[in-house]
Amino acid sequence: MTEGKRSIAGRGPRDSLARGNPRGMRRAPVAAALAALAALGAPAHAADGDGADYDPRSGAWNGMASFVGLAEGMGFSVTPVGSLEWGDLSAEDILVLIYPLQRVDPGRLGAFVQAGGNVVIADDFGDGKDAMAGLGLLRAEPTTLRARKFYDGRAWAPIATARGDHPLATDVGEIVTNHPAALTRVEGATTVLAFDEGAVVVAGERGSGRFVAVSDPSIFINKMLMFRGNIQFATNLLRYLDRGGRARHVVLLRGDVPMYGEPRPFIDDARAGEVGRSIADLNFWLSERRAWLLTPAAMKVLAVGLATALLLLALIALPVRRGPRIDGAWLRFWRPSRRDEPHAVVAQAEATGGASLVLACVLRDQLQHLLAEIVGKPEPLYTIPEAQLVAELSRLRGPHAGAALARVYRRLRALPSRGQAAAPWSAAHLARRDFDTLYRDVAELCRTLGAALPEPEA
């Protein structure tokens, strides 16, 4: 730890708060908290003596076995790490930084949150100050703090009270701190718990991610979790960052742990479409260059703007369709041919020299329909991975069918749509010999499927 807070045990007042009986609290709440921690899995056999500060396996007064037991009792998995590779983190992880003794790079931490990550940075006198500043927070290290209440009248144990109705403050009321620092400037985030001057807990969002900054990591040690408000806050913290059950893995980093690599852009693929993934990539690119940050509200506005722009471009690009000229001869009423009808597509392709490519697209679409009937899923060439589709076809129609599909799968996937292939501006083409080869391979596949060779639609 840094000078001024090298060891929790090394400070007389801190030692007396963490070790001694909390005389200012009634026995019933303390007993209830201890019972809850025991039920959540804190090791009963841990030594009573001092261990390493914030040791996740230690049941000593300055360890974090109670916090780990709380998390595991709530259904989280907890992994303490000896080194951190930023690229290994995903939206399913909650990164908990406890008193880091190596500098936390603000750019990497900000990029991780921006990409959809969940972070707790709890630090008072460690090397997380720059990272907090990158989140819009100024951490001060005052010798005394102005607070309305102090635990048992001790000046180094100020009590922070809840502000507002943030989910982190639910049923907390107040928390007891132990030689804390203070967040004296908060920009773009919400103060959750604070003293008369300075905050101790702040929460915010960047892009599609969330962060919580705590200016006193000792809140999470075993003895401090005996206080009712502290254990309630720790519970709220895990609930707030699990994002509706999506993030259930706690990555715990404490002390002198090296950090490598670069965060990667990611988003919850099960819930996000192409627009969401594109915005996540854009957010990551912007955060890498520290240009500006898209908040969730700004992301929605940008998505609406992009959708509107795409709609306008589509309206401009599409030709205006006109009805037939009415000359009174109603029986001669005719309908213009649609450009996406097969015969119209082929005619256009022949005019532009791309007939082989268009015929291959028609062949692909016919085979797509045949495969959909066999496997029972729409558009299997684009909705089912290659290995899975080959295996399913082998199961239903035999290994020869699977092998025949494997020969043509990637060539069919590489073909454009009919409209793109026939477009006058399209530079794509397919040589006649390549089409003949593809036709023979598709014919062989159809034979193994017991179907007639698909013919281009007339």
Image (tube, rainbow, N blue to C red):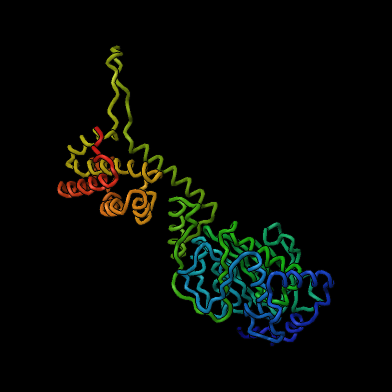
The quarter holding residue 230 reads bottom right
Q: Is residue 107 visible?
A: no
Q: Quick check: 411 left or right of 28?
A: left
Which quadrant, please, contains the N terminus?
Answer: bottom right
Q: Quick check: 278 left or right of 336?
A: right
The quarter holding residue 171 reads bottom right
Which residue is drawn at the image coordinates 63% and 76% (left, top)? Answer: 124
Q: Quick check: 336 left or right of 150?
A: left
Q: Is residue 2 above or below residue 198?
A: below
Q: Is residue 120 visible?
A: yes
Q: How many marks?
A: 0
The location of residue 292, given as percent across then percent down, is 48, 60
Which residue is drawn at the image coordinates 64% and 70% (left, top)? Answer: 214
Residue, far top: 328
The location of residue 274, given as percent across then percent down, is 43, 51
Which quadrant, please, contains the C terminus?
Answer: top left
Q: Is residue 376 above or below residue 321?
A: below
Q: Quick check: 444 left or right of 229?
A: left
